[in-house]
Image (spheres, rainbow, N blue to C red):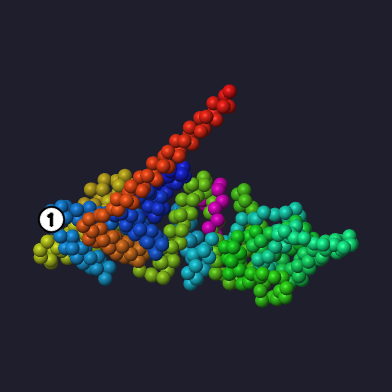
Amino acid sequence: MDKLIHDEKGNTTISNDGATIMKLLDIVHPAAKILVDIAKSQDSEVGDGTTTVVLLAGEFLKEAKPFVEDGVHPQNLIRSYRTASYLLIGGEKEFFATMVVDAVLAIGNDDRLNMIGIKKVPGGTMRDSFLVNGVAFKKTFSYAGFEQQPKKFLNPKILLLNIELELKSEKENAEIRLSDPSQYQAIVDAEWNIIYDKLDKCVKSGAKVVLSRLAIGDLATQYFADRDIFCAGRVTEEDLQRVAAATGGTVQTTVNNIIDEVLGSCDLFEEKQVGNERFNIFSGCPSGRTATIVLRGGADQFIEGAERSLHDAIMIVRRALKNSTVVAGGGAIDMEISRYLRQHARTIAGKSQLFINSYAKALEVIPRQLCDNAGFDATDVLNKLRQKHALPSGEGAPYGVDINTGGIADSFANFVWEPAVVKINAINAATEAACLVLSVDETVKNPKSESAQGEAAASAMGGRGRGRGAFRGRGRGMRR
């Protein structure tokens, strides 16, 4: 289920992404902040499993609480939990799945995530989204004359600049002393000659597409239009670098001595209408180390949620390609390792058997939560899963929650898989977080810090009160 988070600044976010929700929560308790930190770590390192890691850590602590209350030393629990962890670790979906896999394969071994761009265009349906094997970005601000420029080129040369191509007044204070009025005209002519010299050098380079991170003014726009050259100024640094990586070009800080080696190229450049936006698209790039997903959808908040899901999917696919081991999803792997730990606990004497059993029970929170989210009877489904996973033949190992029927099914056969690295990282992080909390016997607060925070809060409240009073005063003045 999605959660709606409304913060004190008035911003509203709708998301079911665990990392996003944890970041937006105003967490005060230090133990809870640990869970936020492990969620952030899970998201940054693996890209998925943030909800899983928080649920597991919370359930591990919940199962440990009765033992702590009964006087069990926390170190005994910590040893058992770490032993258990060591034993374990020693439709639209298809549409976007194909798109994400193709995008990740397009960048190859490049670890830079920004080489996969995600551009959001509200409107249309999710099926209107598409992948560009190259670079796409929204049309930048353009001056008069832009409409006369060609909007499509085959095999163009691309010039990338980090300079202004604009004739404008001097930014800094300047003083020129003239002894003859004719000298003023010479200065004006020199300014025009400088800008025309820059434009001539761009044209002589043979480039048909000119991009710059800085402004390309109306004079340059019309000059290029007369010579059938496309130009775009104020291109963002990220997009310019992605174009450079894809086309093989090099960003230039001068137009002097432009050689062919610094020019980029692609099979096709075109400006295309996408929804209410115009996009500049470079496809068929020789370097092929970048890709762009143009994401369509309904409202802004919906499309932002889809973007977060795509980010998670990209991270997961990258991990899966580098670590090819997968496990059964839908809570199947959680039930299987829970069964394994229960079986192992029978071989251990003493209280540690109880502790490992509690650790094993905590692992069942994942399939239980899946049932709760889908509105199924969690008790009934978990009993079926326990029965299936207890079969001596081991044929029940891949069985997990079937959210389509409310029963259980073979997750491997239904293609419900998880990269093993996600589950390994989640169990490790959740175990360490639970052990860290268990090892703390007391929380010490600085009373001076508390009093300072209280005074600051009171001062802020007082300031807001005075602001409202001042507003009422202005209101009375307006009525009179």
Residue bearing the label numbered 1: 71
Point 67% across, 72% down: residue: 263
Mark 1 crowdedness (10 Å alpha carbons): few <14, some 14-19, many ≥20: few
Point 43% across, 44% down: residue: 7
Looking at the image, which is closer to me, 297 or 43?
43
Looking at the rendered structure, the kind of residue marked 1 is: Gly
Point 71% across, 74% down: residue: 258
Looking at the image, which is closer to me, 205 or 136?
205
Q: Percent position (x, y) of residue 247?
A: 62, 69
Q: Percent position (x, y) of residue 403?
A: 34, 50
Can you say which quadrant of the picture contains the C terminus? Answer: top right
* Among the 4 quarters of the image, the one containing residue 226: bottom right
Q: Percent position (x, y) of residue 401?
A: 30, 53
Q: Percent position (x, y) of residue 31?
A: 29, 54
Please say whether residue 310 is visible from this viewpoint: yes
- Give the answer, above or below, for where 50 lies relative to 454: below
Q: Is residue 197 left or right of residue 332?
A: right
Bounds of the magenta span? 118-131
